[in-house]
Amino acid sequence: MLDIRSLTIDFPGPDGRRRVVDDVSLSLGPGETLGIVGESGSGKSLLSLATIGLLPRTARVSGSIRFEGRELLGLAERDLQRIRGARISMIFQEPMTALNPAMTAGAQIAEGIRLHRRASRREARAEALALMELVRIPDPARRIDSYPHEMSGGQRQRVGIAIALALRPRLIIADEPTTALDVTVQKEVLDILDELVREMGLSLVLISHDLGVIARMADRVHVMRRGRTMEEGETAAVLRNPASAYTRELLDAMPRRARRGFHIAPAAGGEVSR
Ligand SMILES: Nc1ncnc2c1ncn2[C@@H]1O[C@H](COP(=O)(O)OP(=O)(O)OP(=O)(O)O)[C@@H](O)[C@H]1O
Ligand SMILES: [Mg+2]
C-alpha cells in the first residue's frame, strides 16, 4: 500500500541545509493503522505532507515514496492531484482552519464528490447527508446547511472525517486529528475514525504526540525524534518493552492512569489501554 524508503528532507537555511527528516523508512499494508509519534518538531507533519505531495517548495527531498506500487516523488502535479483526495486523503489538526468558513458543511463534503465523480448536485448532496450520518453528526438533515462556526469542535472534525472519506480513498493520513478537542470529544472522534477505517478496510497513518492515542488506535507504531526513527514495531510490543530510551521517556511522561497496563500489556491482538 505505502512504502517509504530512506526519505530525507532538507531545508536550505542561513548556515547551510537543515535536515528535518533523516533517512526514514516505513511501510503500511492494506487495512493497517500505523501510528507516528514524537515530540514537536520531529518531522511528523513533513513526512505526511511529502506523502501527498504538499511539501513547501523550498524543501529538498530524496528517497522513495511508493503508493500502490507507484513512485510518488517527482510525480507531476496533475497526477498527484488525481491521487490526492481520491486515493489518499488527509484529516488535519484544526478543523476550523482546514474547513472553508464561507461554505456549509454539506457543500464542503459534496464538493469533492461533484468534482472527482462528476455527480449531479442532488446526488452529491444525498451522499454528503449519508456521510454525515456515517460520522454520526447529530441531526444531519439540519446540520448539512450549517456553517463551520455554527458547529462544535467535535462536529467540525466529524465533517473533516466525512470530507476525507467522501472519495472512498484507500489511505487516510490524520495529522493530530483530535489534539484540538477536549478529552471526551477526542475519544468519540477517535472511536468513529477507528470504526470506519476498520469497516471500510482503509489504511490509516495516525500522527500524534500522544502515546495514549497511538496505543488505542495503531497496530504498529513508528517513534520519531528530530527527524530520525527511534524505533518501530507492533504497538503492544513497543509499549510493553520499548527498545529506545526515548520511547521510555515518552511512556514515563504519560499520566499514570493512561500508562497503566502498558508494561504488562496483553498479548498481540488484545486491547491496550482502552
Ligand atoms: N517550511 C519550512 N521551512 C523550514 N523549516 C521547516 C518548514 N516546515 C517545517 N520546518 C521544520 O521542520 C521540522 C519538522 O517539522 P514538522 O512540522 O514536521 O514537525 P512535527 O513533528 O509535525 O511537529 P508538531 O508536533 O509540532 O506538529 C521543524 O523543526 C520545523 O521547524
Ligand atoms: Mg505536526
Image (cartoon, grey):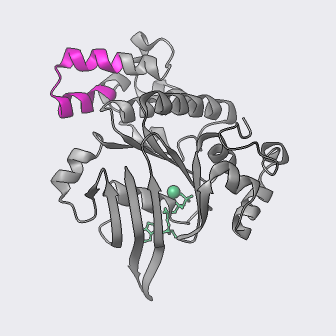
Question: Whole-percent x and y of residue 20?
Answer: 48, 73
Going 81% across and 44% down the picture, which residue do you hit? 261
Percent coordinates x, y for residue 231 in the rendering: 61, 65
Magenta region includes residue 121: yes
Q: Is residue 149 above or below residue 231?
A: above
Place residue 121 in its image quadrant.
top left
Residue at 40%, 62% (x, y): give it: 4
Q: Residue at x 45, y 39 (%)?
A: 31
The image quadrant where one finds the C terminus is top right
Q: Which residues are magenta?
A: 109-129
Q: Is residue 222 left or right of residue 5?
A: right
Q: Residue at x 41, y 69 (%)?
A: 7
* Looking at the image, residue 218 lies above or below residue 223: above
Q: Position of residue 174 (x, y in %)?
A: 47, 45
Q: Main secondary structure of the magenta part?
A: helix
245, above or below 272, in the image: below
In the image: residue 253, left or right of residue 139? right
Evaluate whether residue 7 shows in this view.
yes
